[in-house]
Amino acid sequence: MGVFNQRRRFGDLSEQELIALAISNEEDDARIFRSYAENLRSEYPASAKVFDGMAAEEDEHRQLLIDLHLERFGKTIPLIRREHVAGAYARRPTWLMENLSLERMRTEAADMERNAERFYRAAAMRTQDAATRKLLGDLAAAEAGHQHTAHELTQTHLDAETRDQEDDTAKRQFILTWVQPGLAGLMDGSVSTLAPIFATAFATQDTWTTFLVGLAASVGAGISMGFTEAASDDGALSGRGSPIKRGFASGVMTTVGGLGHALPYLITDFWTATVIAILVVFIELWAIAWIQNRFMQTPFFRAAFQVVVGGALVFAAGVIIGNG
């Protein structure tokens, strides 16, 4: 609450502070666009050029604002940023930008320009000073101009064919980095834990023991799969992306796959828990088949047959061993 209360109201800012805030905003936006460009340059050079051009536009407007401040208020520009002003629109932290997809970067950039224009127009309506109102109106018009410039840059550097190619590359990268490792983990967690969980269930008919075994098997398999995926390929030659991302996707989905049919054993009644666990297994296997069909272009019924048959065999093995 203390930090929030220290924020200035936008309507209380002086004209000098408004100009200083606008300068700071332009600096931040240019920096963000350049970060986007650098992150995209190796794989999406056309989109990188678009963001380079948008950053250059922000630099031009920043220089105009600095010249205005020098003329009206002198060389010393007050230090004021978005986070110092109550209600100002926030920007995504730098460390989160590195993980954005190409399409998400485009969406974020469009939102940045729209939010900036909306912010300046709303601020202009709240001030009674004619000069301040004109300044804020000019800034709003400049942000609207940025949106038009972004469209022109896209038309120049990113024709329909190039955009389609980059979109296909982004989709392929998403599949290689997230979907494939995650699918492998989900399959491993869902299928490999069937035998130990249901063997324990039918051998002991103790739901708590079964849950603990399922929890241990799921977490252990998740850790193992995560480290194995991360260590198997650094992505430099295969183009499969960050090993950390792939390991995370594989490990988490392996754990989720096992926990799905372990959690029902938190129910104390054995047969109720078992019936629910079997239903969960059925849902998991069909989800795997759907993902294979959706992202891997595997015919649905073939994927379903493979997954269901494999899962049924492992499930039967667990039941037989548990009743042995």
Image: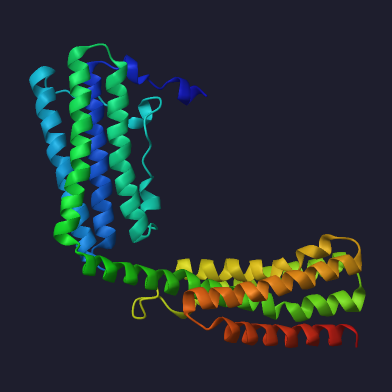
Residue 258 coordinates in the image, percent (x, y): 69, 71
> Is residue 86 placed above or below 32 in the rendered structure?
above
> Is residue 304 placed above or below 65 in the rendered structure?
below
The residue located at (18%, 20%) in the rendering is 134
Position of 61 with respect to 118 (left or right) is: left
Residue 207 coordinates in the image, percent (x, y): 87, 66
> Is residue 212 placed above or below 112 in the rendered structure?
below
Q: Coloring scheme of the render?
A: rainbow
Task: Write down the quadrant of residue 311 in the picture.
Answer: bottom right
Task: Write down the quadrant of residue 237 in the picture.
Answer: bottom left
Position of 131 with respect to 189 (left or right) is: left
Residue 70 coordinates in the image, percent (x, y): 10, 23
In the picture, which quadrant includes the C terminus? bottom right
Q: Is residue 29 visible?
A: yes
Task: Write down the quadrant of residue 280 in the picture.
Answer: bottom right
Position of 217 with respect to 274 (left or right) is: left
In the depicted view, which residue is nearer to us: 183 or 291? 291
In the depicted view, which residue is nearer to us: 203 or 144? 144
The residue located at (74%, 85%) in the rendering is 312
The residue located at (32%, 30%) in the rendering is 119
Residue 38 coordinates in the image, percent (x, y): 25, 58
